[in-house]
Each structure stands twice: as C-alpha cells, then as structure tokens.
Amino acid sequence: MRKIRTLLIAGLVLIAAFAASSLFPHESKKQGKNVTALSNRMPLAKLSGQSGESRLYEITLPPGASNLHFTTWRDGKGAIDLYIKHGSKPSRKAYDAKSTGKESDKLISIPEPESGKYYVLVDAAHGSYANHTLSASYSLPGETFKVGIHSHRLYNGGDWDGPESAEPLFKYALIRDLDISHLHDAAVWKRDGSIDFPLIDKIYSAHAKNGAKILKNFGTVPTWASARPDERNPYYPSWPGGLSGPRDLDEYEDYIFRFVSHTKKYLWAVEGWNEPFACPGDPPEFGTMTPTRLADIQKRVYRATKRAAPNMIVFSPPQAYVCGIPTILSARTSEGEPMWKFFDALSWHPYNRSARGNAGPSYAKELYEVRQHLEKDGLANMPIADSEHGWLTAPKEGGKEFYAMNDVEKAHVLFETGRLAKSLGVIAVIWYSYDSEMIGRPMTSPILSAGLQQMYEELNSEGKNTSIVRAHRTAERATSTPPDAKEQH
C-alpha cells in the first residue's frame, strides 16, 4: 500500500491495438489532405496550432466496440476545444458531443458508440497551443476488466484500528490481499513452516460469496524468515526485517507453492513484492533489497505460482511512482535474466489520478507515460493493472480537491476514472479502500456503495487468463527481435 507518506476492472490489452509502427506517434499519419487518422489506444503527441485554427481527426470503430473516449492533456501551453460527431465532420455548431473551456485536460465519453467513423475537431478557440496529446480509445468484446477493492477488516474480526467492517452493499470482482489484517505473509507463515490455512480459507471464502476472486500480493516475510531480521520495519514495527525479503529463496518458493496450491480456487492472480522502489535517489519504499535480489525473488514467485497453477496470472512488483518503473523493467536476476520474464502484467499504483484531471493529474497521461516505458523496453503488448488507487491528502496533487467533494461527486470521479481505464485497456482497477477515507469510505456511505455497484454491473467483464499470459509471451518474443527490426518498430 502506498502509505500516507507525506504524513502518514479488458482478455487483455489487445495486441492488435499496439501492433502499428509506433506506439506513440506524433501527428503524421494523414488520410486525404485534411484529416489525421487516429488508432485505438495510440495517442498522438506534440500537437500544436495557432489561434483560430481547427484540425480534424478521425477514428473508425468496428462492430461491437463500446466505451469510446476522447482524451487530451498538455505538457505545453494553451487550451483547446473538442467537438465529436459520428459519420460527418463536426463544427462549433454541429456536433454530437463537446468539451470546451480553458481547462488543460479534456474528456468526452460515449459509452454506447455506433460503429463506423467518428470525427474529432480540435479547435484553438483560446489562442495558440503547443505540446498537447490527443487519445482515442474504446473497448472490444472479450477483453478483461476487473473492478476490485482493498479492505483491512472485512470478515477477519477486526484489528488494532477498529472492529470488523460492516458487510458490503455492493459486489466486487477482486479483493487485493495485501492489507487484509491478520493475513500478511508475516502473520500466516509460522516459524514451524506451517501456513494458517483455516484463517485464510475463512476470509477468502467470505469474499467469494460477494463474487470476488483474490489478488494475492506476496510482499512481506516474518522476522524469522527475513534476510535481515534486525532491520527496522517502519510500516509494521512488530515484524522487524519484513522489508528485507526472504533469507532463503528455496524456502520462500516452497511457501508460495504451498500457498497457491491450497488457495488457487479463490485466486485470480498473484503479485510480486509491494512498492519496492521509489524514484531514483529517494529512500526505499516497502522493500530494502537490491533490484537484483528483487528479480531473484520475483523469479521464485513466478516459478512457484506456475508450478501450482500454470494459467494463473502473475503481476509484477507494483510501483507507486512512474519514475520507479524503469528500475522494475531493467532489473536482472543474479543469472542475468530480465525480471519482466517473470511476470505476465505490469502492476501500477496511480494515486491521485482522475479521468478529467479535476481530482489530480490526468489518468490517461500517466498511463501513457507507463506505456512509453514498456515500449522502450520492447514490451508494448504487456497488459497493465491498476492494483491500488485512491487519494492521498494534500499537499499531494488533487488531494484537496477530492477531499472537498461530497460523496456524489466522489462516486462520479471513481466511475469516470474506472470507465476510462477500461477504455484504455487496463485489465483491473482496485480501489483503496472499503474502510478508509482514501476513496471516501464506502463502508459508511450508501452513495459510494451504490456507485461501486454500478461500476461492477456496467464495467466488469470476464476475459480469459490465458489471453493475458499469451500477451506476456508475445511481449517476450518482441524483445528477441533482431536489433535492426527492433529499431524499425
């Protein structure tokens, strides 16, 4: 979990959407003299124009496409207006939808679009503009998207912070087992090597009654099994050494194999070590091991999981900061293998990011930056999961705005952000959390609970785990392309 540090749902991202000559082209692909073609989930960057200019773009939707979004954000100056029309060119007076004004980010959502051409008019009505990005995205049948939550005190009798949480008034497809109290690896993995499966089964089966599968995070170890048992643990003081990783990788792999073998009927995916790195030069987050040691640990997580359940999805160690993702992608095992060989999807925590940029910076922009890192490493086809999303308080950007909203407004931000995430090909969004204030505390809010139920009903979609795993293998083959071919890509 991304702690309050300053104080304190799609089977896959479709391969076809990323198989063009460049994942993030500049404005160059023309159709006719005046229309620029857009492709699904392939933003056009570095757009600029003079005051009063209008530019026209188009995208063709196949039959079955849904959840169409047009998004813009800027890294430069100025503001633009957007006008959208199906089948013919829009104008300031003739359009199906528009987003106008001096805000830097624009968003138009069309949940049930028609097939065929949509035209986009970008209008410099507010003066010249520079270095803007335009994205068009839509969902297709068969894609995976999971809507999930975190919870600390559901079905476990409560903990040191409060009693057991009230029964949810909504369905959820995933529960992330990172912060379920009493289920940390440091608590359920006993000194004699046994695992507290009676407690795990009790809690997992209760979540299953709500329709939920488990995303199991392996992100701590008990003191007796840690590499540095005397090392201070600021997040869990009663488990010294818990951030240092396991002392014995064979022993750790055996623990994961036994855990996954026993619980696989409840599991949707497993995930590597939680938020191990911050930005380069900053103190470590929830891991004090080196990138090489983390890669060795992730290899064991992957190997144990695939032995127990070959089609189980394995997520990367999730990063809370985009600037830390290159460390994950560049990490090598002690045998020189890239760590990304040992996960099927990249896990990422975009705190304080919203669809419209009205409660923190643009979600679409940050996802674009994540995909740039993947593209740079030849992993453009790798699926992405948003496995922890909430709002930290000010001075974190967007914190003041989000916490000032009422529950109706917060529910709208969550729904819009989840819907955009699905359109952009993210395979899961897991909100943090049911029983904290970081999404507005749904546990005590019927309005937020109703919003989460709507999200589950309208956005949750079931694909096949094997498709996500295959996407990883396609990404791996892409990095084996001869150097000259890779440069052309």
Image (tube, helix red, strand yellow):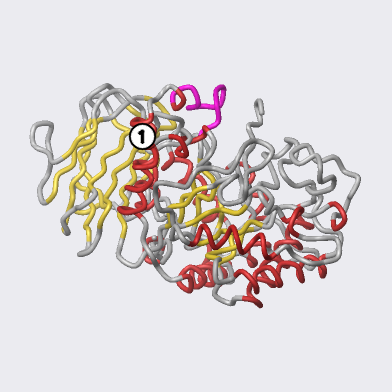
Considering every residue shown, the one lying at the far right of the view is 230
Q: Give the range drawn in magenta.
A: 391-401
Q: In this view, does 470 lie to the left or right of 2?
A: left
Query: In the rendered view, does 441 fall on the left or right side of 458?
Result: right
Percent coordinates x, y for residue 420 in the rendering: 36, 46
Question: Is the N terminus in the top left, top right, bottom left or bottom right quadrant?
Answer: top right
Q: Nearer the viewer, residue 52 or 3?
A: 3
Q: What secondary structure do most residues of the magenta stretch adopt?
A: loop
Question: Considering only vertical position in the picture, is 349 above or below 398?
Answer: below
Residue 318 painted magenta: no
**Is residue 400 covered in magenta?**
yes
Residue that mark 1 sits on: 356
Count neighbours of disc 1 (C-alpha within 10 A) and say few if under 14, some if 14 to 19, many if 20 or more. many
- In the picture, measured across the screen, residue 319 lies left or right of residue 460, that is right
- Residue 333 horizontal/vertical position (percent): 76, 63
User: Who's the residue at 43% across and 71% down the image?
Assistant: 464
Work out whether residue 325 can be spotted: no
Camera sees residue 379: yes
> Horizontal and vertical percent for residue 130?
37, 30
Look at label 1 and name its amino acid: Arg
Provide residue 423's location: percent of width, then percent of height. Answer: 34, 52
Q: SS at mark 1?
A: loop
Q: From the viewer's side, name the closer residue of 64 and 400.
A: 400
Which of 276 and 390 lies nearest the eye of the viewer?
A: 390
In the image, what residue occupies the spot 84% across and 47% down?
Answer: 241
Q: Is residue 481 left or right of residue 254?
A: left
Q: Residue at x 87, y 43 (%)?
A: 231
Rendered residue at 39%/42% (across/down): 449
